[in-house]
Amino acid sequence: MVNNVSYKYISMPIYKLLQEFKTDPMKVFDYLEHVYRVIESVETKIKAFITLMPQDAVFRRVETLIKESKGKIDSMKLFGIPIAVKDVISTKGIRTTCASRMLENYIPPYNATVIERLINEGSIIIGKTNMDEFAMGSTTETSAFYPTRNPWDLSRVPGGSSGGSAAAVSSGEAPIALGSDTGGSIRNPAAFCGIYGLKPTYGLVSRYGLIAYASSMDQIGPMARNTIDLAILLSIIAGHDPKDSTSLPIGSKNYVALVKELVYKEPKLRIGIIKELFENSDENVKVKAYKVVDKLCTYHECLTVSLPYGKQIVAAYYIIAMAEASSNLARFDGVRYGLKVPFENKSWEEVYLEVRTKGFGYEVKKRVALGAYILSVGYRDMYYIRALKFRRILKETFDKIFRSVDVVVSPTMPILPPKLGEFFEDPIKIYLADINTVIANLIGIPAISIPVDFYNGLPIAIQIMSKQLTEEILLYLSMQLEEKTGFRNIIAEVH
Amino acid sequence: MYESSVIDYLEKLALLKFTDEEKKRIESEIGKIVELFSELVNVEGLDIVEPLYHVVEIELPLRDDEPLNEIDTNHELLSGNAVLENGYVKAPKTVGE
Amino acid sequence: MYSNPKLLIGLEVHVQLTKLKSKLFCPTPADYKKSPPNTHVCPVCLGLPGTLPVVNRKAIEYAIAVAKALNCEISDKLIFVRKHYFYPDLPKNYQISQYIGPGFTAIAKNGYVKIFVNGKTKIIRIRRINIEEDPGRILYIGSIEASPYSLIDYNRSGITLLEIVTEPDMTSPKEARAFLEKLIAILEYLEVTDPREEGAFRVDVNISFEGFGRVEVKNIGSIKDVEKALTYEIIRQKKIVEQGGKVERETRHWDPNKGITITLRSKEYEEDYRYFPDPDLPPMRIDKNFIEKISSTLPELPDDRINRFVRQYSIDEYRATILVLNKWLANFFEEAAKIYSNYKKLADLLITDFLRWINEYELMPENLKVTPLHIVKLLKLWDEGVLSVKMVKELLPRVIKEGVDIETYVVSSGYMRISDREYLCKVIEEVIRENPKAVRDALSNPKAINYLVGLVMKKTESRADPQITREIIQDYLNRLRMEGS
């Protein structure tokens, strides 16, 4: 426990904080004061941030905000609410590194669309969070700077790639955060850190300003300590953006109102339990997850559904992700931005090679190189095209499943958070742990990770997936479970 | 162990080098990864479906040909991140291709 | 006897759609050519991390208009792919382009262009048309080789390009020239580009003798240089072939200053561009209505106009083609033809001396001082015998350059043809008196009369009406003959 910190205040959901701030804008300073005390106390142990905004700069920002927002405060949906942003999202004037040496000194001259929306709603960015380098990883250990620790057990990883965002939220360093999710990068760390995380339908949230890993699967999503906060943040970032050609042409919904309405009406749903994804999980995870599903099944109709694919799903995911990554990361050559090496009288090829060799870490190099290989003439049909064909089969499989059930449920992660370094030796083992989460990215559907229980002090979470653009259903079930488990606004005690 | 010539090929394609240590590591991993990728070979019905490139059905939106009013007169987008010389971005030499 | 193997020439033409106001994938203003470097840029065309492309509708409409005008089949889907290669002028190290392959296609393919060479019409097939983004531009410090680093201007990055690729259907530099002239005319008529803008139009040529290695000469900036580069290559390759050598398959560079091509790189293997559909740009259905709407607004195109000129003005295809391929000249012709009906005479003047002087003075068609009325007045004075052909040719440059009103000028300068018989008789008497031998010759040889006429012209500074002069001399000679007999 941190001295002089009101945990009641720190753990307050943002919808309550908003009410306080709107009544008395000066309370924003009080709250931030507490937040910075937490950060001061735990950050050296957790290392959730790559760039932390200094407290005085944030205070000045709040002063300006209060001045500029006169008369508009009531309509601002995140007035004075601090937020942690994954360092893969472009923030004008604030260093954005992707946890890579390549972008260690990169200061973007523009804001991502989601950042513009947060700022317009009065939110305060307090820092950029650690992650796996270029979001490639699921432990936050591939960060070029340092690993982030799991607030529940500092010897363990927080998950990844949005490990910094999850750790910041679960330790009280920020009430909400933005993450990005290409194959589970929001849900995995949300599960490992005991918070709520949602990967929206592909195209619901603008990718403009999200530094691309695998463009056809990347989505930005909200992370929070309760369902309503998650819904508030989603309502702000969702909705059409003309700067993103893959953005769905639909307006933003008020997910809070939708969830409340559903909770009130309480429709009975058909829930599909994906047998294989439970059975393949660690025993402790499996038992706890089944217990939670039982809670859902007392009200809803549950049936078992079968998924006839396993490793193939992971294979298809990594092939597509690596192929797209090789293309997306081609632009890092040090010329317009990024790592610089002396280049006079050297050929451009030598210089590019040196920049990319020094700028990228091992995991990134591996994926970029394998991705180029996968797309090359001799191999594209064997790997890339097959993976895309499998993607269609997987989509059709789930289309069929969703004709008989409304949602499907599984553990978010088949394992408990591993120790740092534990996964280092076996890349396949770590890739296979992504099996539950990559499905939603491969076929573009929404998925939520809901913290439900602990095992030996480590959080356990389940994942629910539903049809495209039915985020409110996921939030509704999350809300129901939250009521039942009481897992809300919980902050890890960092020792 | 994978042949080091494959690694050389990968390096050439991606225009980067693995350090000696990284090379050892990738040589031991690449076989397992390729083995994982080969899981797709025996999926039933794979040959008769079309590849799925885009997961949501969305028509490419088009934008009107309306230019922005401003241009970046003071190089605000590049200064700080690129090395500028008389407004040009300095880059390594090329041999006139 | 040694017989030449067949010559095959194919072209890859890159055309900037300069009439677009913004770039292909971002709203950055496209009129960058007179601006300082790196000012017409935005996060998207600089390829900053996290940026995404959004397609300019007008660019697609223009591309479809061009495809229609080149008689192409238009794809029912618009798909963009990423073409990967590292190079410092390419901000993303991939170019968003199009390609024909599994899962993707070009916007148009299988078209043709008619050319008119040596009195015959020939068909040049179009293989495909791609829409793609232009890279930035690299500058060098001093010479390319000695430059310790390069300087990049991204103003051009993201400008809309069409890549138009022909089949190897051309067999001479002249045909290549005719094709390019026709293509440029079509693009000009469509008002999608101003081909005279610097860098608006770049050509890669593929040239080979059948059965020998194909050589690509890259990035040639004008029609004249295409013709020169081809001629140079033909001679170079012919020499190799005749000496029993092997023409290497390679890419060469045209040096317009030295007038030679030099090796850039050999092409032992195809570069692997690792094409795949751009995940940032979902495909678009190009429905029939969209195409129909564009087709219905196409202007009259060169082929139609040539046919109409032949019909409406009874001029031959050769003259019609020259006129029509110079759009402004054809417009000039049609304006003049409203008030002057000897179309052939008009056409002849325009496509010969008129055009020559325009080029000589390097005049820009859009700010000419000479109007169709000036030329018609000139022609009419010529028809009426007020001006001789020689005078017309002499006066034409001034009319063109300064736009002088010929009627006023002729009156005020006394630059009028002399048809006054009394005056002419005096001059002729002088000439006859001074040249008794010429008169004797003319008496015995009817053709020698021309010499006497010429002497009169000389004395009158070409102002004597040659017709009347001839009549008077003839009369005089006839009288002499009668007196002599």
Image (cartoon, helix red, strand yellow):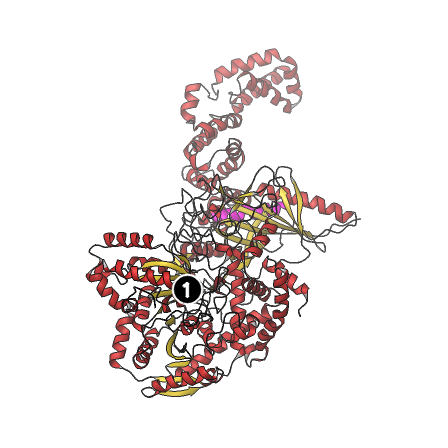
Dominant SS of magenta comes to helix
**A193 in magenta:** no
Q: Residue drawn 66% across and 22% down?
A: C445
The quarter holding residue A53 reads bottom left
Pinpoint residue A182: horizontal percent, then vertical percent: 46, 68
- Frontmost residue, A65 versus A158: A158
Magenta residues span C168-187
* C181 magenta-colored: yes
Q: Is residue C9 left or right of residue A14?
A: right
- How packed mark 1 is, by other alpha carbons closer than 10 Å (few <14, some 14-19, many 20 or more), is many
The image position of residue C234, as x and y in percent, is 69, 46
Image quadrant in which the N terminus of chain A is located: bottom left
Res A265 seen here: yes
Q: Residue A230 at what x, y percent from top left?
A: 33, 70
Q: Quadrant of residue C124?
A: bottom right
The C terminus of chain A is located in which quarter?
A: bottom left
Dot 1 falls on which chain? A
- The foreground one among A64 and A38 is A38
What's under tag 1, amino acid-wise?
Answer: Thr
Q: Nearer the viewer, residue C391 or C81?
A: C81
Q: Which residue is mark 1?
A: A246
Q: Nearer the viewer, residue A300 or C40?
A: A300
Q: Is residue C357 left or right of residue A39?
A: right
Horizontal placement of A17 versus B87: left or right? Answer: left
